[in-house]
Image: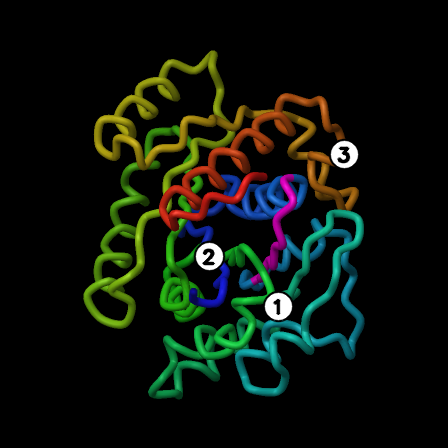
């Protein structure tokens, strides 16, 4: 029987402000509550997954930048986020410099994949919070990943941005990562009072069918407040609509992941 390998999923949408980091962080926390071992990689130079996890980086702390430029291994850069139970490789503005350094390399798309190769048996899930751009950092995440999870805000321009991301996924499938799959689309910041939300939601379901997660994350003030306290919404306000939605998403994600791998473990 082959050694257990982590499922690597890139959380990506080149459109900013759609709940990408929020989804990566709260999905990580939700999976931990279900007994899973989770590593979260903060690949966004804004570093919001890091600060949202309550981590304040010092000058000498190792980050994903150091991993990508070959100055540290994943293991050396990992921080255990005790409050939420997952492990984190932090990110910050230095990742912009990593992007420049990667551009000079012939294997620029595969650096993260190589770095993660020795750590896939240490975790059940590795989630990568991608930057809101289709750049070489996102390319690294998609090359390393088994799947891409796309948070979507149900608004007028949502479908436009989605097509560019899907084109990029198709290009990567056709070149460096034929196994890359669309893990699913998550409707975030959903406003039931907005007719347009309902229309875009129906469009998504008709285009993508069961790739659209059943769980819908509502627009919820608790979800927005939690990162400023360095917490997931699951710990900040466990009974809030946002927390219940992300718990539901974690459960649905896990059922899908186990169904696809034929892994019959119970949570």
The mark found on residue 7 in the picture is: 2
Magenta stretch: residue 36 in it? Answer: yes
Which residue reaches farthest left? 174
Residue range in magenta is 34-42
Question: Is the residue marked by circle 1 packed among few (<14), some (14-19), or many (20+) residues within 10 Å?
Answer: few
Task: In this rendered view, identify the residue nearer to me: 119 or 136.
Answer: 119
Color style of the picture: rainbow
Residue 120 x, y percent position in the rendering: 52, 67
Residue 199 x, y percent position in the rendering: 31, 19
- Give the left or right position of residue 58, taking residue 66 as reference: right
Q: Write the residue at 50% across / 60% down.
A: 6
The mark found on residue 17 in the picture is: none
Task: In this rendered view, identify the residue nearer to me: 96 or 209.
Answer: 209
Of marks 1 and 3, the one in the foreground? 3
Q: Which residue is the site of mark 3?
A: 236
Residue 71 x, y percent position in the rendering: 62, 87
Query: Quick one: label 3 or label 2, which is nearer the N terminus?
Result: 2
Q: Write the residue at 40% across / 52% down.
A: 14
Q: Which residue is the site of mark 1?
A: 93
C-alpha gap between disc 1 and disc 3: 27 Å
Query: Quick one: label 1 or label 3, which is nearer the N terminus?
Result: 1
Q: Write the residue at 56% across / 71% down.
A: 119
User: Where, by quadrant of the figure, is residue 26 drawn?
Assistant: top right
Q: Write the residue at 65% across / 32% down.
A: 223
C-alpha gap between disc 3 and disc 2: 27 Å
Quadrant placement of the N terminus? bottom left
């Amino acid at each position: 029987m082959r050694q257990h390998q982590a499922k690597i999923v890139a959380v990506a949408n080149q459109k900013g402000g759609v709940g990408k980091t929020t989804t990566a962080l709260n999905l990580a926390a939700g999976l931990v509550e279900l007994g899973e071992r989770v590593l979260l990689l903060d690949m966004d130079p804004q570093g919001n997954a890091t600060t949202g996890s309550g981590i304040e980086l010092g000058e000498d702390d190792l980050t994903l930048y150091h991993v990508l430029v070959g100055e540290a291994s994943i293991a050396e850069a990992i921080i255990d986020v005790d409050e939420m139970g997952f492990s984190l490789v932090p990110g910050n503005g230095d990742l912009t410099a990593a992007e420049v350094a990667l551009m000079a390399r012939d294997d620029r798309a595969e650096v993260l994949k190589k770095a993660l190769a020795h750590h896939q048996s240490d975790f059940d899930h590795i989630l990568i919070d991608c930057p809101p751009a289709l750049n070489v950092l996102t390319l690294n995440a998609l090359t390393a990943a088994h799947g891409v999870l796309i948070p979507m805000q149900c608004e007028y321009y949502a479908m436009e941005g989605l097509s560019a991301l899907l084109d990029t996924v198709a290009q990567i499938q056709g070149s460096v990562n034929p196994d890359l799959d669309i893990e699913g689309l998550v409707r975030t910041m959903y406003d039931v009072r907005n007719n347009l939300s309902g229309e875009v939601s129906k469009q998504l379901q008709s285009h993508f069918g069961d790739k659209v997660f059943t769980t819908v994350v509502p627009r919820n003030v608790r979800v927005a407040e939690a990162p400023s306290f360095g917490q997931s919404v699951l710990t900040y306000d466990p009974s809030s609509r946002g927390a219940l939605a992300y718990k539901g998403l974690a459960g649905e994600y896990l059922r899908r992941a186990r169904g696809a791998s034929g892994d019959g473990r119970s949570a």
